[in-house]
Image (cartoon, rainbow, N blue to C red):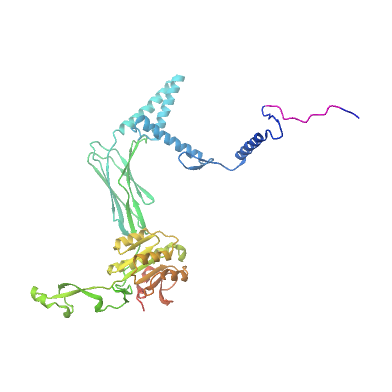
Amino acid sequence: MTTGTPTPPPGPPRGRGRVRDDGPDQGRPEDARLEQMATSARARATGPRRTVRLPGGRLLNAGRGAGRAVRHGAAATDERLRRRWFGGRLDHVTPLGWTLVGLAILAWVLAVVLGWVELALVAATLLAVVLLCILISLPAHRADVELVVDPLRAQIGDLAQAHVVLTNPSRRTMLPSLVRLPVGDDEQVIPVPLLRRGAQHRTAFPIDTPRRGVIPVGPATTVQGDPLGITRRTVTFGGAQHMHVHPRHITLESGAHGLLRDLEGEVTPELSMADIDFHALREYEPGDDRRYVHWRSSAKHDRLLVRQFQETRRSHLGVVVDTDPAMYRHGEGDAETAIAVAASLMVQSITDAQEASVVCGEAFATRTTIPLVLDALTAASLGRVDLVRGARRVVQQAPDSSVAVLCTGPGRAFLEIQQCLGEFETEVHKVVVVVDPVSDPSLRRLRGLSVLTIGELADLGSVTAGLVPA
């Protein structure tokens, strides 16, 4: 039997990373920490792209947003330095001007170090050009800009113009400049020639009105600087003017708005003597009923005077517009036709001195004037809409509605139409105007509703009889 010294178990590796093992539970927290650090390093090396949050609060991709972050930070730093060192007096110097100054300084340093006279001449030339451009732009030129949009309310296809008048009220001659004027999604750049003291420059350009909408015009901004682009001064004048391009509308037959609700709440399409009340006296006109001649007042004033009556009945038209293009056969085009139908009904109702309310998406107007109603319809946007909520809004604002009209497309389910118009009272005459270009104009009665089908806006005049109850 062979005996020998037992081989000791292998100990921990020697080196800087050696961990002393004094017991069965010693060193484990350190091993866990090292393992966690290794796992984090592998995740950073092989994991997905990281994101960093800059002090400005914007979340940028570490791979593609770092360049933008550096440029943004450099621009902000440059702005702070100019404000701090120069008191904002050199804010009109462009990045090109500062780049030339930096090149001039670099050329001057190299000329001193290398002893090259040519680099010194380059530095002097660059500095002279920058200083000359700065002197040209001092002091700041002051100009007055007047913007007039005519008209502020137009119809689709109407001619509209914007007039810009720039005046030089200073004693100095104003160098050629530019006027930048945003018009909707575009921008008009107006060149302005040299203007002497008190001189004016007038210009006008058309504004296209191809479709319904609100077109912001302005504010006007003047841009003045030197020909090399080393300095640039921008001044903004006033605010933006909003031009409303109203939806199309046609003239309908007067009085074709259905039921009349009198002051006692009774609903009837007829007009009786109980629905009128004495209002004032006026001079007799041919065709007036002689029974209404007020003889005592006529004898006193030596001319025939008749009683003028005022109707005590009330008629209120409530219109709900379906602005969801998915419900129409041709999408947005037919949805615009539905808005045009609502505009025609509202305009004719107000023209007939009858009250009306309309809800079109988020836009709402009630008991107001024709321009304001059309402005509300102009600002309406297309998209999904809750018709029941819109009908409830009309009922809340106009509980005395006598006729309810829903303008929609063939894609809207009949159950949804019934739910919408069901928000109105039972005695209210309910009408559905369906815009369907592939169908012939028609009028039919269906489950207590008058269903009008039109292909285009011009067909509305031939089926307005559906607005009157049978």
As for residue 297 lying within the magenta part, the answer is no
Between 15 and 317, the residue placed more toward the observer is 15
The answer to whether any part of residue 249 appears in the image is no
Residue 365 position in % (x across, y down) = 34, 62
Left or right: 350 in relation to 280: right
- Main SS, magenta region, reads loop
Residue 150 position in % (x across, y down) = 28, 54
Residue 80 position in % (x across, y down) = 39, 34
The answer to whether any part of residue 77 appears in the image is yes
**Location of the N terminus (image quadrant):** top right
Counting every numbered tag in the picture gives 0
Say above or below: 293 vs 118: below
Q: What's the residue at 42%, 32% (across, down)?
A: 99
Give the residue furthest to the bottom: 291
Residue 141, picture quadrant? top left
Say above or below: 127 vs 164: above
**Location of the C terminus (image quadrant):** bottom left
Between 118 and 40, the residue placed more toward the observer is 40
Say above or below: 167 vs 385: above
Q: What's the residue at 60%, 39% (across, down)?
A: 44
As for residue 8 lying within the magenta part, the answer is yes
Residue 129 position in % (x across, y down) = 36, 29
Residue 201, picture quadrant? top left
Between 58 and 94, the residue placed more toward the observer is 58
Give the residue furthest to the right: 1
Residue range of the region highlighted in magenta in the rendering:
4-15
Residue 115, picture quadrant? top left
